[in-house]
Image (tube, rainbow, N blue to C red):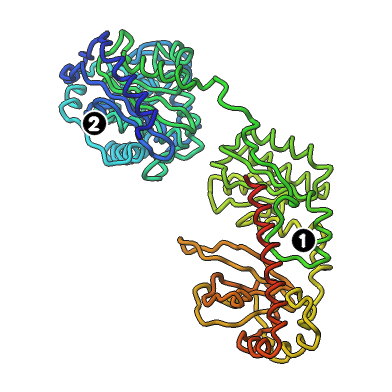
Amino acid sequence: MQSPIQTYLEELHRSLLSLEVGAVANYIPELTKADPAWFGITLVTMDGVVYSVGDTAQAFTIQSISKPFVYATALADRGVDCVSAKVGVEPSGDAFNSISLDPQSGAPFNPMINAGAIATTSLVAGDDSARQWQRIEESMAAFIGRKISVDESVYRSESDTGFRNRAIAWMLKNFGIIDGNPMDSLENYFKQCSILVDCRDLAFMAATLSNGGVHPVTRQRALPSEHVESVLSVMATCGMYNYAGSWLFEVGMPAKSGVGGGIIAVLPGRFGIGVFSPRLDAKGNSARGLEVCKRLSQDFGLHVFSRIGDPSMALGRVYTGADAPSRRQPSTEMRADLMEQAHRIKYLCLHGYLAVDGVEYVIRKMIQMAPEANSFILDLHQIDGISDCAARLLNEARVEFGRDGIAVVFSRIHARQAIAQPLKKTMAKGDRGYLSFEDNDMAVEWCENRLVGNAAHSAASFSSLESFMFFKGVPLALVAQVEATTTLRSYGPGEQIVTAGTAGDSRVFFIESGQVSVLVPLDDGAHHRIASLGPGMNFGEMLLLGQTTRSATVCADSHVRCRILESSELEKIAAREPQLKIILLENLGKDMANTLRRATQWIAALA
């Protein structure tokens, strides 16, 4: 099945083929060789999915679309203060090749007009022009996702006819904006404008900015995240020259055009757009490219000032520890306490990218639930990322709830830096940090212990088999016979007691003290915890139903003491006393029914 996005782009491309207004650029002789019929559209998502239609593999020179990316490189190399001292960020309202400088400082108004672009090219790191060009090549390659090449004939044509740009460069030298020989920087500027790209390259460059400076496919960081906002802001206000105001009004996306016929548009956090069509309007922008972006903005609601989403969408399913208790087997006393109080454990499943408005809504809901809450579990499994400001709010709320005796813990971050890093770096001084659990089961078990007091319930030691539910209803004399055949063994924290896949292991384990986790192996080599067992619990009893191979791994979470029964000894006693096996199978059946009920309860809670 073809994606509806692909179908839409094909229909859009087809509908604009007949638009033949404008003309190919002719002020650079080599540009006149472009075929005015060329037309391509590409859209790239944040995970690198590409939708393309038309002449998207046709190579052309990038021209002024290089400007925001070289500006980005200068910011990364020199810092905002240094670059801002040489180049402003104010819209000029003038054409791209205007000779316009600030009358007070002599600085270009912004880096998108030629004067500002020549200045930013001179600010790229490098001891000489050759090293500066090498840095530009590396930076542009990181944005595109491949090595770059220059159209030498276009470069020579630009250099041979660039008299106006030479005047601009010497004027910049006069005002102290460019150090050294301005002609060296100018030649690098001509080269950067002559880099060969295609429509897909433009879309990937836009998508890299949209993705916070990281290329969606190579995952290489092309620009430090702190500079992305600056680049997009200048593109939004200055990227379309003396059409910038109308563009922001009609389309509403940070963008940049080039006289080679390309346009890039960026929708932050969503996707990048590249359009190529050489026919230019009177202001030097691709006529078809403008129309493509207008249609996309209108049809998909892409204007940055439009209402993007409802903050309430950040919060999905809300349920309690009574709906989804931990998978451990609690003692009778703990089970009774949890039945009364588990509703005070609140799960909140968060969705999407967490910005300030979404987190504000989540915190507001937590405040409303606080009078009946002992702890909150924030399930971050379906979170794509979190802004620094949102992370700061969440950390502050966590601390405030803690002062009121309510714990806030995180679950299922899974080492994703887009979540972990903002949470870590926005903690206030003196904050001891947040609790993060691998899965919800571990999180709710911790909350259960906090709720009812783990120490009181785990202090009991089951030193006789008659105390185990597994032997409920078995005559004491028979229990004594079974116990006489058992052995005792201790295990240290982290020690593996049984291993999944092991055949021929016929032992049943009865936990006298300590805690163990039952783990099921996953295809990727990791494990998923399906149960936590403590004193009075047992494992390995499925051999009574004919199981011959261990289906799970059991590891000690603490110091554990087990009483071990060999199934062969149990069979000998059962051969003499058949009622033993009958009672044990009845108890096993009841236990399996309880396990199934809890699983059904979990499914209902998560449905």
Q: Quadrant of residue 128?
A: top left
Residue 569 horizontal/vertical position (percent): 64, 89
Left or right of 344? Residue 192 is: left
Residue 398 locus on image (x, y percent): 73, 46
- Rounded to the nearest angstrom, the CA distance separating label 1 from label 2 is 61 Å
Quarter the N terminus occupies: top left
The residue that appears at 70% across and 77% down in the rendered structure is 584
Mark nearest the camera among 1 and 2 is: 1
Q: Callout 1: helix, strand or loop?
A: helix
278 with respect to 340 (left or right): left
User: Residue 404, image x and y in percent?
Assistant: 83, 47
Figure quadrant of residue 351: top right
Q: Which amino acid type is shown beneath numbered disc 1?
A: Asn
Q: In which quadrant of the rendered view does residue 486 lie?
A: bottom right
| Pointer 2 local density, CA inside 10 Å: few below 14, some 14–19, many at least 20 | some
The structure residue drawn at horizontal position 49% and vertical position 20%, both measured from the top left corner, is 303
Q: Nearer the viewer, residue 231 or 435?
A: 435
Please tell me which residue is depicted at 31% across the width and 13% down the height of the picture: 287
Residue placed under numbered mark 1 in the picture? 449
Image quadrant occupied by the C terminus: top right
Query: Disc 2 marks which residue?
Result: 57
Badge 1: few (under 14), some or many (20 or more) residues near its Cα, within 10 Å? some
Relative to 482, residue 587 above or below: above
Q: Is residue 560 above or below residue 397?
A: below
Taking depth in this image into account, of 244 and 15 the one nearest to the observer is 15
How far from the left and from the top, in percent, is residue 490? Answer: 67, 83
Report if residue 463 is visible in the image.
Answer: no
